[in-house]
Amino acid sequence: MLNLEDFRGIVQDETLAEIYERARGLYGKHVVHVNSTYMGGGVAEILYSLVMLMNDVGIDTGWRILHGTPDFFEITKSFHNALQGSDIELTDDKKNLYLQINSSYSRFAHLDHDCVIVHDPQPLALIRSYRKQQPWIWRCHIDLTEPNQKLWNFLKGFLLKYDQIVVSSEKYYKKDLPVAQRIICPAINPLNHKNMDLPESTVMEYIKKAGILTDKPLITQVSRLDPWKDPEGVVDIFEYVKEKVDCRLLFCYNLASDDPEGVQMYHKTFSKARKHVENGDILFIVGNNDLLVNSIQRYSKVIIQKSIKEGFCLSVTEALWKKTPVVASNVGGIPLQIDDGQSGFLLEPQDNQGFADRIIHILKNPKDAQEIGKKAKEKVRQHFLITRLLSDYLNMLNAMINHSS
């Protein structure tokens, strides 16, 4: 059970007192979060901690999971991709199935709370099935810089009914959307199994149990196997690095129930990396154990995040918290987390040689790596812990619920 008092010593007492004060205005209120999966991905991880803490400070908070079919999740994955700029064949059949699943789910989900918070596009159309009597908030965790206009126009019909839209960066503000918009950056829970402090003996136990040899420095990308994470490009970078430093690459990946592309991308990346896999220099490990992921992020010499598009990227936050140097794409919410050259390195997504050069520098300069790691952890402590996220949500809910009542 997670309690706010557990964070004493990690954040200042003044921060905790401020959170309790903000919660007082919400005593007796009922709030519900709705998303499409309870595991696999940053949204589920955030909600697991956030919902517990909201209840702990006195707000009755629920969490509902949209019930979808494989066809529905194929469609909503294409929505996700199109919101980040991909083409989409938006047929009437796809729109009808999307609306039908949302409508059917509304019969199960009695959303009569004081505020409803809907996450991402999968349950966005739920609002269509309700006679709205409370504030509804859409929390979008996706990069909305250049959405496909055909899909955006379709979804905007539902968004107009919402009272507020929450995004992760000011880059995602939509001028053509006449609805109040707010920035709330995601955050990590430093006390959960994925981020808690671990003794070196435990780290090494998990590394060896996973079959990771310790004879070479390890470079790791922790992410879904998703085209937007460009795992094939990571293989290209590894080949550049390996010419200068004998090292090993690890893909620590997970598969979420609402992401049907993962298996396809695995086979595509594995095929490209086959010769390195056969000689033991590229590994694929499913990150279905949080202590394993934690250990891998701590043991790795460099974490790479070669995203083409990115809403925020909590795997970057996790690595920064563990003082592991990060070399990442200068896209989406990543530059909010990294001061280039200070707490990590930022590159344009297609600059493979630049990625390789920064990784080589870290591997060859352990003192620089140590200094970067210290600055990285402090930046996360100041800006990207779950206590700050909780505080932001309480601010928003006070404004939405108490203003509307």
Image: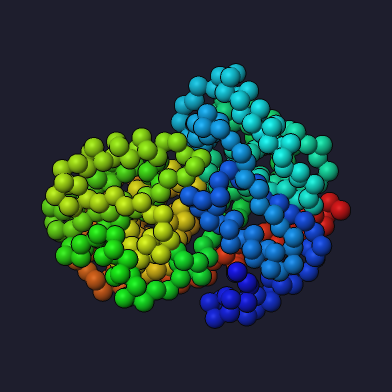
The image position of residue 41, as x and y in percent, is: 48, 50
The image position of residue 1, as x and y in percent, is: 60, 69
Measured along the vertical axis of the image, is residue 65 above or below residue 344? above
Query: Relative to residue 373, is residue 355 drawn left or right?
Result: left
Q: How many marks?
A: 0
Measured along the vertical axis of the image, is residue 181 above or below residue 368? above
Query: Relative to residue 64, is residue 265 drawn left or right?
Result: left
The image position of residue 216, as x and y in percent, is: 18, 63
Q: On the image, which quarter does residue 304 sit in?
A: bottom left
Viewer-side residue, 344 vs 161: 161
Q: Residue at x 42, y 45 (%)?
A: 255
Q: Residue at x 33, y 58 (%)?
A: 303
Viewer-side residue, 370 vs 292: 292
Instruction: Mark yes or no: residue 355 visible.
Output: no
Viewer-side residue, 49 vs 18: 49
The image position of residue 9, as x and y in percent, is: 54, 81
Q: Residue at x 56, y 57 (%)?
A: 46
